[in-house]
Amino acid sequence: MTNPTVVPGIAGLPAWAAPDGAELAAMVRGQLGRPNATVVNWWIEEVDYEIGTPVTARLTRVRGTARDGEAVLRWSFFVKELQSFRLWPPYERVSKLVPDFGRFDGRWRFEADVYESDLHHALPPGLRLPKVYATYEHDDLRTVVWSENVETAQVDWDIPRYQRAARLLGQLSARLTRHDLYPETASRVPGEMTRLYVTTRLEAGAFEDLFADSVWEHPLLEGTGSLRADLERLAARVPELLGVLDTLPQTFMHGDASPQNLLVPKDNPQGFVVIDWTMAGLVAVGYDLGQLLVGHAHAGLLDAAELPALHDEIAVAHAQGLAMDGFPVDLDELRCGFDAQLVIRSAFTALPLGRLREPASDKLADLVESRLALTRYLVDLGLALPDRLTGSQVWRS
């Protein structure tokens, strides 16, 4: 292993994206609280995580050891590279679908802007941001954030933990919205981010991939009954869903509040460290509950049969959190926003289409079976949403 006090930078990362030896030593000392510690060595670990957003280019952990007297100490950082939309491979194709797509380009840096803002002062007790040690910019197209590598507690996500997360997300949403606390790179056009997702993800390829005949001819999708036809029916309702969402109360959201992004720290297992702040904006109330509900199901850690009961618990808790911080909403309206946005974001992308090209195996069969159950749940949820009403245009469950 290389000694970074001799060789500037971190091998394996671009020179612009890493501290030199002196900077790294200062960061390590600050993290350890040891002003006399010296860095001994370091190494890089690529993070095994499926990147689902166009503005995230790379995730790594940098780990190492330091010495302070006779003590040998371990240290680590989480390193995230953000990139401009212009570096996203589908950028040219998406730009043709969204002629003014270029106006979103400045928003790729949103997560770094959140960490550099005063938002941490406004988070409700029980939520905190990871500590950021350094940010490096490059050619106006890339930013790398060196942050705390949160040591997580090994805990179960039981109903009370889900409820606590939903309640805190409600408080967060209320505070963000009432006081307009997000950086300027957040969208302030109601529903804009949801429509952008429909255009750039669903209409730009997901629908075409999902409804290809070859998909439904795969042996693992035989016997799925009406699922394909029901997905097509649901896809036809997306414009209607978008219209109804516009009639609901609008709030700022985290953007990807799955349990995987609500880290449970060892030093406070009743709280959460909130990471992966995606591009955010004003959306219909209840948005963040969607990924909170299905995040573990999508990862194979929660059975789809458990989702209906969990759905109701977190909806009520989220409404409580909103009310606690001065943004009360009608529970039926919250459920409407929750369900419609969940369906739009997850129903058409839950099936692991890219994995269907793999050789047959029990592991693949189990994955497809679990994702079919998740898709069936989401489709049924979407098709059960009543037609758009006149007058108040509120859906009743």
Image (cartoon, helix red, strand yellow):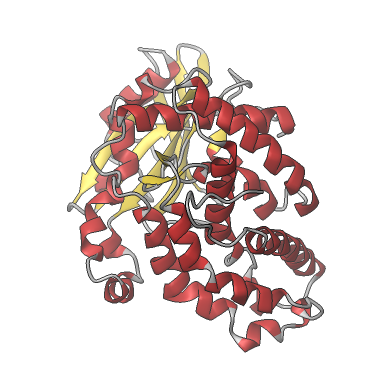
- Residue 103, percent across and down? 21, 58
User: Residue visible at 78% across and 46% down?
Assistant: 306
Q: Quadrant of residue 188?
A: top left
Residue 234 drawn above or below residue 195 = below
150 vs 302, left or right, is left
As drawn, the residue found furthest toward the left would be 139
User: Residue visible at 73% across and 47% down?
Assistant: 307
Residue 211 drawn above or below residue 291 = below
- Residue 98, percent across and down? 29, 70
User: Residue visible at 60% across and 40% down?
Assistant: 259
Of the pair 14 and 292, the residue shown nearer to us: 292
Q: How many marks?
A: 0
159 vs 274, left or right, is right
For the N terminus, give its image quadrant: top left
Q: Quick check: can you spot residue 136? A: yes
- Residue 378, percent across and down? 66, 59
Residue 281 drawn above or below residue 42 = below
